Image: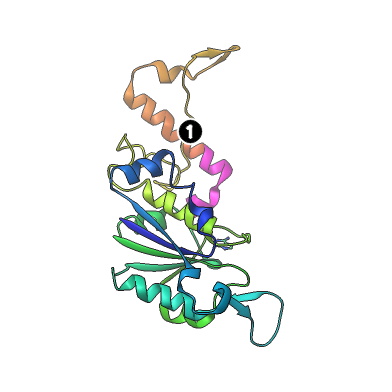
């Protein structure tokens, strides 16, 4: 899968994909992330990409021309399955969206800044608008990194233990159960006996009950969905 990300602050996206699981995905050739500097596509002086909004009001708006130049130039090389705009007024990102997007081949993400991007670009080029939560970030880059990570780790072969993405929180509409590792007894705090029983059926039952209990207590909303 390829994820191209258009940004005015490309350096912000240098580190998130250079470590750990995202690095492994890249090293294995399963995920290619390209960060594109929007300023390379402007014809305005001093690499300008934003301007005052028509009608007045505080805050600059990202201009349509550099965005269209960038997208149309990229589209000469590949066809995108989705062109995603990261914005607080988009639909809230969740595991189901991550699953769906992980089945695509080519994604393009657009990171907004300032007051956002010219509505005409949204109307004519964007196929999906996604928010990562009800708060405002200073730009879409961190949101693009969140999506890329959540999607990238789902690609077959990225996680070592193939089953591990399936037992994540949200994957079956439940939060994940508690987990324990060595030592068995730390300061008298012991692990649940059942986990030492070797009885897989019993352990699965216990995990399911724990997951259910956690979900009811912490996130009853996802059970209702
Ligand atoms: N850009 C600014 N805030 C955002 C958010 N919450 N989600 C996605 N993109 C954003």
Residue 225 appears in the figure: no
Tell me: is circle 1 under 8 Å from ligand 1: no
| Residue drawn where x is 43% and y is 78% of the image | 68
Looking at the image, is 129 positioned above or below residue 176? Answer: below
Total numbered badges shown on the rendered structure: 1
Residue sitting at x 46%, y 17%: 193
Q: Position of residue 31 (x, y in %)?
A: 33, 51
Secondary structure, magenta segment, majority class: helix
Residue name at image x 42 percent, y 77 percent: 69
Position of 32 compared to 207: left or right?
left
Secondary structure of the residue carrying numbered label 1: helix
The percent position of residue 213, horizontal first and vertical second, equals 52, 37
Does the segment drawn in magenta span residue 203? no
Image point (54%, 60%), residue name? 9
| Residue nearest the observer in this picture, 175 or 210 | 175
Give the residue number, with chain letter if any, for mark 1: 210
Q: Nearer the viewer, residue 60 or 132?
A: 60
Circle 1 Cα neighbour tier, 10 Å, few/some/many (<14 / 14–19 / ≥20): some
Q: Quadrant of the N terminus?
A: bottom left
- Per the rendered image, the range of residues in magenta is 214-225
Most extreme residue toward the front is 45
Residue 163, located in which quarter of the rendered image? top left
Residue 31 visible? The answer is yes
Rendered location of residue 118, percent (x, y): 54, 79
Q: Nearer the viewer, residue 50 or 61?
A: 50
Tell me which image quadrant ligand 1 sits in: bottom right
Snapshot colouring: rainbow
x then y, percent, for residue 40 = 46, 69
Return the residue nearer the eye: 223 or 89. 89
**As displayed, is residue 198 above or below residue 74?**
above
């Amino acid at each position: 899968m390829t994820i191209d990300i258009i940004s005015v602050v490309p350096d912000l996206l240098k580190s998130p994909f250079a470590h750990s699981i995202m690095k492994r995905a890249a090293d294995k050739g399963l995920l290619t992330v390209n960060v594109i500097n929007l300023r390379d596509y402007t014809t305005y002086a001093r690499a300008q990409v934003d301007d005052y909004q028509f009608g007045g009001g505080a805050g600059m708006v990202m201009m349509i021309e550099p965005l269209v130049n960038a997208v149309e130039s990229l589209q000469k090389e590949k066809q995108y399955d989705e062109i995603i705009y990261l914005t607080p007024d988009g639909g809230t990102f969740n595991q189901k969206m991550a699953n769906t997007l992980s089945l695509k081949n080519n994604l393009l993400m657009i990171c907004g800044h300032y007051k956002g991007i010219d509505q005409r670009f949204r109307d004519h080029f964007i196929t999906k608008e996604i928010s990562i939560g009800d708060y405002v970030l200073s730009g879409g880059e961190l949101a693009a990194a969140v999506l890329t990570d959540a999607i990238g780790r789902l690609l077959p072969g990225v996680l070592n233990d193939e089953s591990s993405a399936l037992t994540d929180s949200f994957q079956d509409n439940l939060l994940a159960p508690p987990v324990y590792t060595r030592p068995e007894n730390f300061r008298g705090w012991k692990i649940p006996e059942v986990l030492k029983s070797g009885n897989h059926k019993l352990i699965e039952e216990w995990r399911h009950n724990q997951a259910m209990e956690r979900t009811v207590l912490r996130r009853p909303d996802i059970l209702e969905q």
